[in-house]
Image (cartoon, rainbow, N blue to C red):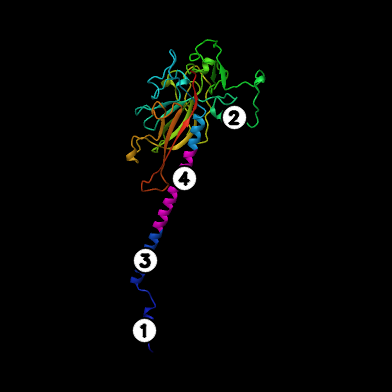
Amino acid sequence: MKMNPLSRRRGTTLLEVIVALGIFVTVLVGIMQGLIATRNYVGEDEIRNDLELEGLRLLKEFTGDLGNSAWFHVEPLPVGTITLPVLVNKPVPMLVSPEILPNVGKGAAGAGTTDWGDQLDFVKLRLKDLTALSPYELRVHTARINLQSSVATSLDQFLTAKSANNLIVNEEWSPGIDEDLEPYVWPVFESGKAALTFDQNRCLASPANSPRLYRYIVRAIPGTTNGRMVRQYSNGPGLSYAAIPTHAVLLTHSGATITPPAITNTPNPWIDDVILSDNIKATNDPRFPTLVGTPGLRFDTNLTDPSLSPNQVRITVMLVRTPVNSNDGTVVRRVIQTSVAMRSITYN
């Protein structure tokens, strides 16, 4: 019987199997590497978009706060009034009066402003009828004036018109008095207590009867290299900034709230109002060797940068985040910057 010469080639040799497996593995590795690279790129791009949206949200918070704040400036400064001393724009701001605020805090490491960025202390104008112990209570109520439903009152009806709760008249004023020293009318600042007198509304000296002081700060997040930006408030700071304690409870996640204690005669504590971001770059973040010394949160006013106008605050925020499953040290960075013009109020 004659044997078919092809019958011996119907099987596959071991060498052919090895070569085939080698080609298959090579192709598979190439596909996997491509998928991983694509996934990393998509992940980084998503983070960039997330940080972009976070930056826009932060800008909205800043403009909402500082747009309803006030920068009081008098040029030249009248004799006998509070001056703008060297203490302004230092880690320990002068708390004699809201007239010197907002204050940019810049200082050495250990003062709480360099390791995690600048801080900004400010007061807000009262724009709602409600006086609440917590700013959170104010945010759940609508604004006092609705221009779509409220109708302006004619001048001949001023005696029966609704009073403007965001203005207060100086009870001590009399004709002929120096209005630089004793203005006739004054804006009302947000406060945890109602019915402050003209002098109490104008001064932070009495912790029990004082405007509410706000500040933006950045603090460390345990176990990470990022900083956490928080807006805090004190319902009565008093005159010694260093004497203001910090509330024992701190916010650890967005959406949480803290019930403030009752207002006392001693400096009332800093209380976390809201967490604004958990992605602030540390000043000396080793992941950015060319940016060591650059704070992740920076505030500037005319007193720190003369190129700004007297009623402007420039804000620079550097957001960073590490992609999930990133093993190559990749860190996504986003920088946002804006200048906010406050309600400029002068009384000269």
Q: Position of residue 152 (x, y in %)?
A: 64, 26
Q: Residues within 10 Å of mark 4 (few under 14, many from 20)?
A: few
Point out the frontmost of discs 2 and 3.
Answer: 2
Q: Taking 4 as reference, is 201 left or right?
A: right
The amino acid marked with disc number 3 is Ile
Residue wearing tag 2: 143
Amino acid tagged 2: Ala
Label pair 2/3, CB-CB below 8 angstroms: no
**Mark 1 — residue?**
5
Asked which secondary structure carries label 2, the reply is loop
Is residue 210 covered in magenta?
Answer: no
Q: Secondary structure at mark 4?
A: helix
**Residue marked by disc 3:** 23
Real-space CA distance between mark 2 and mark 3, rounded to the nearest whole angstrom: 70 Å
| Residue 83 spot, x, y in % from top left | 42, 17
Tell me the magenta residue range.
32-56
